[in-house]
Image (cartoon, helix red, strand yellow):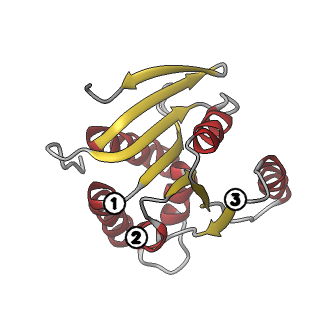
Amino acid sequence: MLSMDSITSNCHLILGGARSGKSRYAEQLAKDSGKVVIYLATAKVKDDEIAKRVARHQQDRPSDWQTVEEAIYLADKLQQWASSERIILVDCLTMWLMNLLSDDSGAGNNQLKTEQQKLLKVLSQLQGEVILVSNEVGMGIIPLGELTRKYVDEAGRLHQSIASIAERVTLITAGLPLSLKKPYI
């Protein structure tokens, strides 16, 4: 497992299943922050269904939010845009992970591990707030295909690593938030 257990970062990991309300919840938190919002989108539009999802997300966002697209080098973009005056909303980590797993450059597992390690390091040192949205995919049946099993395993490891350093972790089910980890007061 990728971990930096002794570090707590100013990030909020929001997990949930498909159509659970996790993006809507994250967007409301970003709005309520009163800060400039940078929406860091990780989707690669490869088919009509994803194009429709992206268009719906774009329509739902306030017009004053700046959208930054990055499918692979997430840590680099977080470093570039982070500041105490901004909040960065990343939607979503599992799409980013799929991009790394299916990258056509041939970089394969090395790039996957490198980018995950870079992300954890950046999150632990980030100046400013970040909200990370991700799909909880490991609560169902065990997938039959090797790539799908690897995806579920990698997502689970990534979530555990980020949760260990995140200040907050929330699980969304049926549009309802369940706080799994919140800051000590």
State left or right for residue 3 relative to residue 137: left
Dot placed on the residue nearer the N-terminal end, 1 or 3: 3
Which of the labelled discs sits on residue 126, or is there none?
Answer: 1
Report the residue at 76% width, 50% height from top: 61
Report the residue at 54% width, 44% height from top: 133
The image quadrant of residue 180 is top left
Q: Alpha-carbon neighbours of circle 2 within 10 Å: few (<14), some, or many (≥20)?
A: some
Judging depth in this view, the residue of 146 and 153 nearest the camera is 153
SS state under label 2 = helix
Residue occupied by mark 2: 79
List x then y, in percent, for residue 116. Answer: 35, 60
The amino acid sitting under disc 2 is Gln
Give me the C-alpha separation between circle 1 and circle 3: 20 Å
Answer above or below: position of 98 versus 103.
Answer: above
Dot placed on the residue nearer the N-terminal end, 3 or 2: 3
The amino acid sitting under disc 3 is Trp
Judge whether residue 95 can be spotted in this image. Answer: yes
State left or right for residue 154 relative to residue 27: left
List x then y, in percent, for residue 100. Answer: 49, 65
State left or right for residue 137 relative to residue 23: left
Which of the labelled discs sits on residue 65, or is there none?
Answer: 3
The amino acid sitting under disc 1 is Leu
The mark tally for this picture is 3
| Cβ–Cβ under 8 Å for marks 2 and 1 | yes
Q: Alpha-carbon neighbours of circle 1 within 10 Å: few (<14), some, or many (≥20)?
A: some
Judging depth in this view, the residue of 29 and 177 nearest the camera is 29
